[in-house]
Image: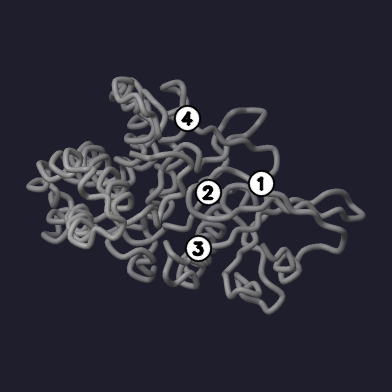
Amino acid sequence: MDLNIINAFCLPEGEWEAAPYGNGHINDTLKVTVKTAEGEKRYVAQKVNRYVFKKPEEVMANMEKVTGYLKKLIVHEGGDPDRETLTIIPAKDGKSYAYDADGELWRMLAFVDNTISKDLPDTPELMELSGAAFGKFQRQLADFPAAVLAETIPDFHNTPARFQQLIDAIEQDAAGRVKDVQDEIEFAMAYQANAGVLIEACAMGDIPLRVTHNDTKLNNVLLDKDTGECVCVIDLDTVMPGLAAYDFGDAIRFGANTAVEDEQDLSKVQLDLDMFEGFARGFFREAGSTFSKREAALMPMGALLITLETGLRFLADHINGDKYFKIHRENL
């Protein structure tokens, strides 16, 4: 890894050190600490995964537009724009990113101090806080024109398209694994008929296209170390046009699961209705006024479809040879 990329950004004068940070599945992340005359300043440097994001410049353009909009709105609402949304540190050439010697795109973000994140919500109250954070994100961006954002991962939350990707992976069988996952393939294909409920509702004009986060897990919400309250939503790589029901559903898939995301004992995996209700309370308290009755009624369907879709993605990636998700053990 070429750490000279750190010098490409507008950081304060002083010696710096960088170390691996976090446990994200997609991007390589470093915590950068700069020792200045005024004390230590902390930042987060990330290399954007080009396999996942074919046009990482569009990822950064989306992030610039959304954080810029949010900062103005947060100031208008009397909040703290340096804590309540991400701050992009520009490169020395004025862009929001820089390329390293290998042509990989990096970005630098201000570290939000005095915050923590939790990998798994353990109480309905914490789920309610998470719901409020993502509901606020949805409410604040309700008037943002979603169409100006690039679709950085085409058909990211398009369940029929995910089925087609699985079918393509099966036909290509690039890693020679299809013979070993016949039961999983049969299970997945049994749900294909209902895959298009949300996409069709949008096409018919029943629900609108919105700005969506597309990775609404609790560990993408920073919590204040002292108060436990939500500070801001992070990990904006996948912010793009989408459907709110998928955001709602992804949070339920992650947070109302009675086990960790990669649990190997499937008997432990169930839906915790108390956690479901906790998230829904927070989410609708913040964003309920922005949804029509039809859109609100379709939110639970998002939980069903996103769970199915996530399984399709993991299965297709396994068949393709683990190209998208980082793995640390046999994953099927």
In the picture of the structure, the residue carrying the numbered disc 1 is: 112
10 Å crowding of disc 2: few (<14), some (14-19), many (20+): some
- The amino acid sitting under disc 4 is Leu
Q: Position of residue 50 (x, y in %)?
A: 47, 66
Mark closer to the chain start, 2 or 4: 4
Report the quarter where the N terminus lies.
Answer: bottom right
> Which residue is painted at 40% across and 42% down in the image?
135
Q: Is residue 114 left or right of residue 138?
A: right
**Are dots 2 and 3 in contact, CB under 8 Å?**
no
Which structural element holds mark 2?
A: loop
Q: Is residue 210 left or right of residue 160?
A: right
10 Å crowding of disc 1: few (<14), some (14-19), many (20+): many
Work out how far the residue at label 2 is from the one at label 4, CA to CA, in angstroms. Answer: 16 Å
Q: Is 24 drawn above or below residue 37 in the view shown? A: above
Which structural element holds mark 3?
A: helix
Q: Position of residue 164 (x, y in %)?
A: 18, 59
Mark closer to the chain start, 3 or 1: 3
Residue 64 visible: yes
Q: Is 291 drawn above or below residue 141 in the view shown? A: above
Residue 234 circle label: 2
